[in-house]
């Protein structure tokens, strides 16, 4: 007999995934994503991101992978009223659509700073220890490098989060050895073993891997 609760059934997972409902503004952002071939975060991940931003009372958040603004809108809705989202994407057209999403949602222009460029080109230019939350949804092959940058960017007590942490059920299958799957699997192991991080892997959407940066005594 198992000594833990058995896995939930698909119907229960679907119920939990949509427990926090999306409105017409998020639906419009998803429609834009379909038009340009972007895969945004699922509602469960979005709700988790809003929750994390709210718990942190986040004033400054970095997002790698703007898309059409689905995850960005979830984050902004959890951040404090004067919080600023810095969102990075290599596709300027996607960011144009994200700006439409933010504008339709009534987000002031000075609260969403969009930067067109590759994540690993932009992140090194951002301020050390300034951010409450770093959300990574860019090139999966660069996730390890995103973690390194996030640890520098986060304040103590801040959180880094990675979307697609289960990668379409491939990460849990040791027979899957493609580059993206191996990178995400290794990322999980690195975060688990990191002495300065408190990790959690949430089975929402395609998996959300999050870790809190611990407070460290000053040298």
Image (cartoon, rainbow, N blue to C red):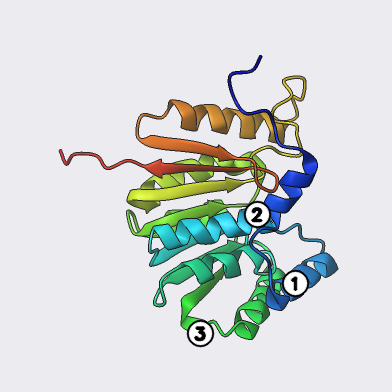
Near mark 1 (Cα within 10 A), the count class, few <14, some 14-19 or many ≥20, is few
Reading the image, the residue beneath label 2 is 44
Q: Count numbered badges in the picture.
A: 3
**Taking 61 as reference, is 154 above or below it?**
above
Q: Residue furthest front?
A: 1
Give the residue displayed 73% in from the left and 45% down from the top: 12
- Mark in front: 3 vs 2: 2
**Taking 154 as reference, is 141 above or below it?**
above
Residue 108: numbered disc: 3
Q: Residue furthest left?
A: 219
Residue 146: numbered disc: none
Q: Which numbered disc, 3 or 2, marks the residue that appears first in the sequence?
A: 2
Q: Which numbered disc, 3 or 1, marks the residue that appears first in the sequence?
A: 1
Give the residue displayed 57% in from the left and 85% down from the top: 106
Would residue 155 appear left or right of 70 to someone viewing this image? left
Near mark 2 (Cα within 10 A), the count class, few <14, some 14-19 or many ≥20, is many
**Taking 113 as reference, is 118 above or below it?**
above
Give the residue displayed 50% in from the left and 73% down from the top: 113
Q: Secondary structure at mark 2?
A: helix
Q: Is residue 116 visible?
A: no
Residue 27: numbered disc: 1
Residue 133 position within the rendered picture, expressed as x and y whole percent measured from the top left:
44, 55
- Mark in front: 3 vs 1: 1
């Amino acid at each position: 007999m198992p000594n833990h609760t058995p896995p939930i059934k698909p119907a229960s997972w679907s119920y939990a995934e949509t427990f926090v409902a999306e409105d017409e503004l998020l639906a419009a952002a998803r429609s834009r994503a379909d038009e340009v071939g972007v895969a945004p975060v699922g509602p469960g991940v979005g709700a988790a991101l809003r929750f994390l931003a709210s718990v942190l009372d986040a004033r400054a958040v970095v997002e790698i992978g703007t898309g059409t603004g689905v995850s960005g809108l979830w984050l902004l809705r959890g951040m404090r009223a004067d919080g600023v989202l810095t969102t990075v994407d290599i596709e300027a057209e996607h960011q144009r659509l994200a700006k439409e999403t933010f504008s339709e949602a009534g987000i002031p222009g000075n609260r969403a700073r969009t930067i067109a460029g590759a994540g690993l080109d932009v992140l090194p230019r951002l301020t050390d220890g300034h951010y409450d939350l770093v959300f990574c949804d860019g090139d999966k092959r660069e996730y390890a490098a995103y973690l390194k940058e996030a640890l520098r960017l986060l304040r103590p007590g801040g959180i880094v989060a990675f979307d697609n942490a289960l990668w379409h059920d491939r990460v849990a299958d040791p027979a899957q050895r493609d580059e993206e799957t191996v990178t995400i699997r290794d990322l999980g192991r690195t975060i688990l073993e990191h002495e300065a991080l408190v990790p959690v892997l949430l089975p929402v959407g395609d998996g959300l891997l999050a870790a809190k940066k611990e407070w460290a005594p000053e040298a």
